[in-house]
Image (spheres, helix red, strand yellow):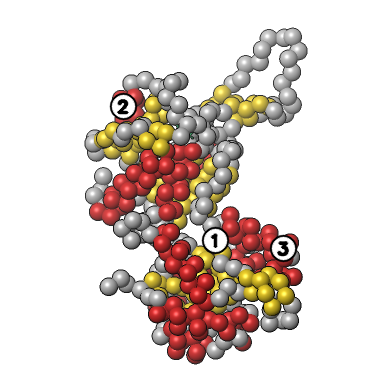
Amino acid sequence: MKPPVKIALIISGGIAAYKIPELIRRGRERGMDFTCIMTEAASRFVAPLALAAVSGNRVLDDLFSLTDEVEMGHIRLSRESDLVVVAPATADIMARMATGQANDLATAVLLATNRPVLIAPAMNPAMWEHPATQRNVERLRQDGVAFVGPASGDMACGETGSGRMAEPGEVLDAILDQIRRCEGPSGTHPLAARHAIVTSGPTHEAIDPVRYIANHSSGRQGHAIARALADAGARVTLVSGPVTIADPKGVDCRHVVTAREMLEAVETALPADIAICAAAVADWRPQSEERNKLKKDGSAPPSIRMVENPDILARLAGHPTNRPELVIGFAAETERHEEHARAKLTRKGCDWILMNDVGATSGVFGGSHNRVMLLRADGTGETWELMEKSRVAQRLVDAIAARLADGDGL
Ligand code: PMT
């Protein structure tokens, strides 16, 4: 028999909270196990005792005592479920989520979770349509939060419009959709509770206010890897240089321009279990950025003095306190491919390196396909056939999941 789907159900203070006992009762019939977390306002709309009775579990609220915290810290609570659901989600809790607040148990759980989050908004139509709420909705969507509803119709406040919480059956369907989306073909979350950092795209290193040094990386390979990791259940921080492709869904994307900004964003995102450096980081940058545009004034062309950029991959691999368990680099080579890639693997101290041929005719930079050779620090390696970058990403994620599952200590 399949184990029940574990739901952390956050109930905020809206009239629609009266629908929650029915949602729980019907969800249990469909194989769900609910742990309810209530905001202070929610307990004015639905009795904690009723929720405890219908869910069969203790209800947690802001009276969450120190003993509870020791037994089940809010971090653990936020990560032990398959999905975090906020229903009903008031304008207030959405605003607090969008600004990353953690001033009660419900928002602390939401900030600490690495599980997918689904919310069912419920509020007065004017509140829903208010630009502030819509800004928060947009922000939350960018953060990978999924929505069910709100529906349109007559509201308890007597007004008509959009803002009514989706019916329990619809919320349950959306829960199961989310669960299916996160499950691999085997029905498991191979990278659940893992945090992965991915770098992607080029960096731009300014020469003067209008010119910069860059390369042809489009971000397609790195973004595909971030997406595949998220689909495998990992919490993913994608640090991307300037690209024109969209942020992948379900991924926390940090946008940077220079190599130094990329390093800072990566270090801020630590700790992580997995780091994958797919970005084409500029090895050098102009020593200083000219304050004004360089002028073509008839004298000799300017010579630009270059200095070395920090090596993000090497920093991660040699991190004194927070080295990810698995550090993976790419090697972009145009000649003596395997030899150069192996030398890079050793020099930078990573566990695996994916060599790709970026010679002029390969079409790898910016293209849709890639052919990689996976080289491991233990001297083993394999060549993968030419395939779409999304398939390279999926195959890499499968290899990572297998490696972390059996911890073969490469
Ligand atoms: O973005 P696409 O158009 O999809 O193209 C994909 C890609 C070709 C950019 C990608 O597959 C790839 O090869 N990325 C690495 C490009 C690169 O900079 O390779 P490198 O051999 O110069 O660097 C080796 C490794 O060190 C890379 O993991 C790189 O991210 C990392 N590095 C390099 C320099 C630096 N200062 N910091 C780094 O972290």
Residue lying at the far front in this picture: please name it: 153
Give the mark nearest the N terminus, 1 or 3.
3
Asked if residue 134 is positioned above or below residue 226 in the image, the reply reads: below
Ligand 1 quadrant?
top left
Q: Residues within 10 Å of mark 1 (few under 14, many from 20)?
A: many
The residue sitting at 56% across, 56% down in the picture is: 143
Question: Label 2 amino acid?
Answer: Glu
Compared across the picture, whether 367 is left or right of 393 comes to right
Of circles 2 and 3, which is in front? 3
Give the residue number, with chain letter if any, for mark 1.
145
Mark nearer the N terminus (2 vs 3): 3
- Amino acid type, residue under disc 1 in the picture: Val
Q: Nearer the viewer, residue 339 or 94?
A: 94
Residue at 66% in and 12% down: 301
Identify the residue shown where x is 72% and y is 65%: 129
- The residue wearing badge 2 is 338
Where does the N terminus fall, quadrant-wise?
A: bottom left
**Label 3 secondary element:** helix
The answer to which of 307 and 344 lies nearer the viewer is 344
Tell me the quarter of the picture where residue 305 sits: top right
The image shows residue 13, relative to residue 82, as above or below, that is: below
Percent across and percent down for residue 188 are: 33, 61
Spot occupied by residue 303 in the image (x, y as percentages of width and height): 62, 16
- Mark before the other along the chain sequence, 2 or 1: 1
Q: CA distance from mark 1 to mark 3?
A: 17 Å
Q: Residue under circle 3?
A: 132
Q: At which x and y percent is residue 295?
A: 74, 18
